[in-house]
Image (cartoon, rainbow, N blue to C red):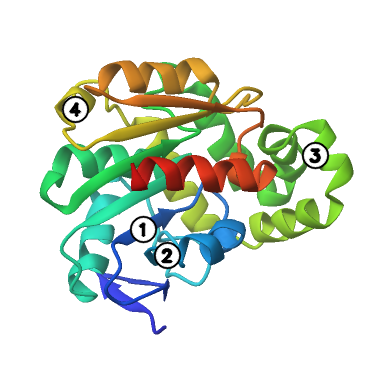
């Protein structure tokens, strides 16, 4: 699919599944691209019109200099939907994708049917780790973070038994635009959805990874408690739960969306 020009930025989008099926839009984590959903897309495309995209600064999308904001990133999504003439979606976002989902749920409620917010957070009180990360990437590049990221993203057991997946994810990470990565880090550092999450009306499922050090279960539990009626599911995985437990993740999301 060609790049979609939205909100002043060209965004790479892929669409699969039956044209008249309900739409499920997928949003990737920081430092990855739409291919993190490869394990799910084939299964979900049997029942949904699946829309995947590379967030600005990632994958094949343009990477304007930041800083970015979640208002900007959320409006990118609305521009994609308008370009594709899609009125409403189900949303599944992991990590940063879950942060965009929180923005959409509160700020574009008429566009969202159901929300899946996975392995994510709503606020970081301490900004120092994000400022430190920005400085490290500016000085040493993304390669300086790659090994630590793999340790946060996947459990030791998974890293041992799935070397091909780890190699794929390392490559995706180190080939991410530095400008895009830094712009997104600033958005995450500055986000605060604590006041807006209670306004979300869409049925919501929050997924946590029981072994997730990047967005610990407590972060997801706080989101679940803030959103009226939200449900919680826990998977025995680290941060990139959909890749570590693909079958469990695929079923958990599908059961919620069909329920």
Q: Nearer the viewer, residue 133 or 51?
A: 51
Q: Is residue 259 above or below residue 33?
A: above
Q: What x and y, as percent, mark residue 81?
A: 23, 66
Please tell me whether mark 4 or mark 3 is closer to you in this view: 3
Q: Give the alpha-carbon distance from disc 4 to disc 3, as whole Å.
A: 36 Å
- Residue topped by disc 4: 196
Q: Give the alpha-carbon distance from disc 1 to disc 3, as whole Å.
A: 27 Å
- Residue topped by disc 1: 25
Where, quadrant-wise, is the C terminus in this rendering? top left
Identify the residue at horizontal 73%, vertical 45% (top origin).
146
Please tell me whether mark 4 or mark 1 is closer to you in this view: 1
Q: Nearer the viewer, residue 79 or 190?
A: 79
Identify the residue at horizontal 50%, vertical 72% (top origin).
60
User: What residue occupies the far front of the structure in this picture?
Assistant: 259
Q: Give the alpha-carbon distance from disc 2 to disc 1, as whole Å.
A: 8 Å
Where, quadrant-wise, is the N terminus in this rendering? bottom left
Q: Is residue 231 above or below residue 70?
A: above
Q: Give the alpha-carbon distance from disc 2 to disc 4, as whole Å.
A: 25 Å
Q: Which mark is residue 158?
A: 3
Label 4 crowd (10 A; few <14 / some 14-19 / many >=20): some
Identify the residue at horizontal 39%, vertical 84% (top origin).
2
């Amino acid at each position: 699919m060609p790049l979609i020009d939205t909100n002043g930025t060209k965004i790479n989008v892929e669409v699969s599944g039956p044209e008249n099926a309900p739409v499920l839009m997928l949003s990737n984590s920081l430092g990855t691209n739409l291919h993190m959903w490869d394990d799910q897309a084939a299964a979900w495309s049997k029942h949904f019109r699946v829309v995947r995209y590379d967030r600005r600064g990632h994958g094949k999308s343009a990477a304007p200099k930041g800083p970015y904001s979640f208002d900007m990133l959320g409006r990118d999504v609305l521009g994609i939907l308008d370009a594709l003439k899609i009125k409403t979606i189900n949303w599944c976002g992991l990590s940063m994708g879950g942060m965009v989902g929180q923005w959409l749920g509160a700020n574009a409620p008429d566009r969202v049917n159901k929300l899946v917010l996975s392995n994510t957070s709503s606020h970081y009180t301490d900004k120092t780790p994000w400022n430190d990360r920005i400085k490290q990437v500016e000085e040493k590049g993304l390669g300086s973070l790659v090994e630590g990221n793999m340790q946060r993203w996947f459990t030791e057991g998974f890293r041992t038994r799935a070397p091909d997946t780890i190699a794929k994810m390392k490559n995706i990470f180190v080939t991410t635009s530095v400008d895009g990565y830094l712009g997104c880090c600033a958005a995450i550092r500055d986000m605060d959805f604590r006041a807006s999450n209670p306004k979300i009306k869409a049925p919501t499922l929050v997924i946590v990874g029981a072994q997730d050090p990047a967005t610990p279960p407590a972060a997801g539990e706080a989101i679940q408690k803030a959103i009226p009626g939200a449900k919680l599911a826990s998977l025995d995985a680290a941060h990139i739960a959909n890749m570590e437990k693909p079958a469990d993740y695929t079923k958990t999301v599908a059961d919620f969306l069909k329920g």
